[in-house]
Amino acid sequence: MARLNSFHLPAQSWPSGVGEMLRFTGAEVRHMLTVLRTEPERTVRLFDGQGRTGLFRVRETDRNSALLEALSFAVHPAPEVGVTLAIGWGKSKHRDYLFEKMVELHGLGAAFWPAVRSQGKMPDEAKETWREKCLQAAKQCGNPYLPELSVLPGGLNDLIAFASGFDACYLAWENDGVERPLGPADLARGKSLVVIGPEGGLDDGEAQALMQGGFTPVTLGQSILRWETAATYCLGLGWYARQGVK
Amino acid sequence: MARLNSFHLPAQSWPSGVGEMLRFTGAEVRHMLTVLRTEPERTVRLFDGQGRTGLFRVRETDRNSALLEALSFAVHPAPEVGVTLAIGWGKSKHRDYLFEKMVELHGLGAAFWPAVRSQGKMPDEAKETWREKCLQAAKQCGNPYLPELSVLPGGLNDLIAFASGFDACYLAWENDGVERPLGPADLARGKSLVVIGPEGGLDDGEAQALMQGGFTPVTLGQSILRWETAATYCLGLGWYARQGVK
């Protein structure tokens, strides 16, 4: 089967059953009609980013909307294993790239926090443009789950509180005293949180506070990784860890 | 010790011994003097990209050059374990990004080849701008080895011949019949070559020819990865595999 074009339909807008009709509107339908030139009788894939996907047939189109018939629904079980990253804030042109890689490698989420060496002002909440980037990546790679994005304005205290929701918490700390490498086995059970410092790394006091807060210090190896390389590397280890998980 | 600024000095320009003076010129010295404003008596780190590094003291500077005294040299053993990628050519804005990640994660090299689904014209040889990107990344992350970059204009035949130089050869192929995940253990011994298709993936005939040529088909998991995500993921598995290698 040729790959179907995917579009996002928020969870609250889904029809309740197969055979029902849906009037599809908004930015996604403009993409469907004007960029992809989707015509009546074509089948498309919709997803809600929370594990539900559906096949729909295009019945009618006009300038700004499409009438879709629900053909079949599928619900993908929520991942029981996966990695969330807590990333020290920075002013980086590579943030969008990270969101893309996170969705492709099925990361569960990213939380940004203000670190001692953070540069630039962190926004008060996760930005809509970040979610949009994730959504575009999900359309491309087929991941039925969008990652949870958040900011932790309270810094270390918020981060330690946030960590209580995870089965295992790691601190990627480039320090000569840290010799334990983070590996797939560390990320193979339950939900893991990995703290990544901002560009420039963690401050010693910060690292000490996180270790006292229960985070296990780990090394990502003897190379000075940019923050987004460190992040993608951790997501990759987590993705590898999930290859054996059915 | 505060991190020293690093500059590239090609292998043929190195002084023969400690205590000797070097007249440092060219683009790197302009960066040293005008961007980093390095002054006399500062210590800098030079590297040749082939495993040699040295500490030098700045003795004099003028507009276009610096006189450096060699303080100490170190030779880093050539890596015996590592990953080279053979990447199907594509017209991608993400190529520079891949070079950066390759240097940070100590990949040994990249060879581009024209695949059935390649788009855009592949250059006749590895571009100087690619090496420059690797060099800038090496200055940042401290990797004493620059990756080997090449192009394989003869396509599959060249790729199969190129593979003879490696201890293990894998083919990352997204096909329902391929269930063996590529993992760190596959990349933990000797030099490995991993073929990554172009954006759009490998053609079936191409994959069959490579398997007949001795490549082991592997999956990178059930997600449609962009080429540079697939590449960075493989480099990450190889970097993890090296964490136990002393």
Image (cartoon, coloured by chain):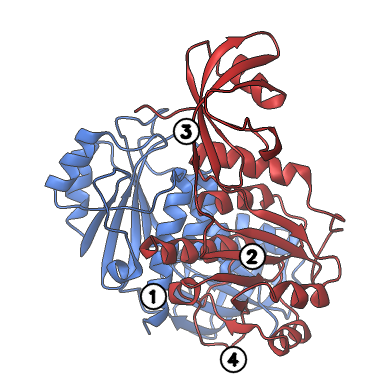
Chain colours: A blue, B red
Viewer can see residue A93: no
The single residue placed furthest to the left in the displayed view is A212
Cβ atoms at labels 4 and 2 below 8 Å apart = no
Q: Which amino acid does label 4 sit on?
A: Gly
Q: What element carries label 1?
A: helix
Q: What element carries label 4?
A: loop
| Residue where numbered disc 1 is placed | A242
Q: What residue type is labelled 3?
A: Lys
Could you confirm whether marks 4 and 3 are on the same chain?
no
| Residue where numbered disc 3 is placed | A91
The subunit carrying tag 2 is: B
Residue B71: x and y in percent read 48, 26
Q: What residue type is labelled 1?
A: Arg
Q: Residue B177 carries which label?
A: 4
Q: What residue sits 74% from the left and 70% below the top?
A: A38
In this rendering, the label closer to the viewer, 2 or 3: 2
| Residue where numbered disc 2 is placed | B85
Cβ atoms at labels 1 and 4 below 8 Å apart = no
